[in-house]
Amino acid sequence: MKKILYYLPSIIFNVVEILAIFIVGISLKLKLEIIILLFVLFAMVRIKLGGAVHYKNPIKCAFWSLTIFASLFLTSYAGLKISLPITIFCGYILTTRGNVDDMFQWKRESNYNDIDEFIKYSVTDDRKEKIKEFERKLKIEEPQLYDIYSLRFKEGYKHYEIQKMLDIPGSRLTERLNRIATSFRIYCK
């Protein structure tokens, strides 16, 4: 029962969002078959590729979902030969495989890029186990540092977002992130 209550707000949000998407399609005077086709195709591409990109803020999520689907629905006026490839392309771009940051050879460097990449590209079992061991030890020995580590390196929150969430001044957060980074680099070599 607790699990249902935990996921209930998310379920309600998703149902309302899907209904809003269908209302946008209907208000554009599209046939129900076209709306369903584009919606299912978009969803299938994201599910098949995995690693769908999500916004942590539900308002941003709803805004961009409605904007994307309104755009896809408008392309259907040009015909399905144009609309279907664009829908597939949009589904691809909104996964981690089509991440815009990875499309270019440059991006803003941070002090923790090596850690981000180590975590992101750790595919071998021994590397994954090393990361899990580090996380377990950090969680036991320094719970607050583990929270910062989790927010920054596992969930991808930005510095200013973590500051607000944990109510930590910027300089103190930087100091703690540097401690985490040093520990991670030593532990994971």
Image (spheres, rainbow, N blue to C red):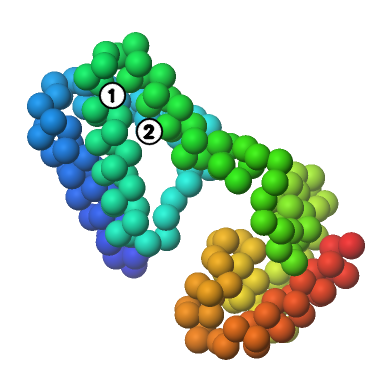
Image location of residue 177, percent across then percent down: 70, 76
Badge 1 amino acid = Thr
Residue assigned mark 1: 75
Q: Say whether residue 79 is visible.
A: yes
Name the residue beneath numbered marker 2. Answer: 43
Determine the residue positioned at 77% across, 71% down.
Answer: 181
Q: Residues within 10 Å of mark 2 (few under 14, many from 20)?
A: some
Give the secondary structure at mark 2.
helix
Mark 1: few/some/many CA within 10 Å (<14, 14-19, 20+): some
- Above or below residue 173? Residue 187 is above
**Mark 2 vs mark 1, CA separation in Å:** 17 Å
Q: Are marks 2 and 1 in contact (CB under 8 Å)?
A: no
Indicate whether 14 appears above or below 103.
below
Q: Which residue is drawn at 42% across and 55% down?
A: 55
Name the one closer to the observer, 5 or 152.
152
Taking the spot 55% from the left edge, 36% from the top edge, the residue there is 98
Q: In which quarter of the image is the N terminus?
A: bottom left
Horizontal arrangement in the rendering, residue 34 relative to residue 57 (left or right): left
Quadrant for residue 88, please give it. top left
Q: Residue 177 carries which label?
A: none
At horizontal 26% and vertical 55% (from top left) the residue drawn is 13
Q: Which of marks 2 and 1 is in front?
A: 1
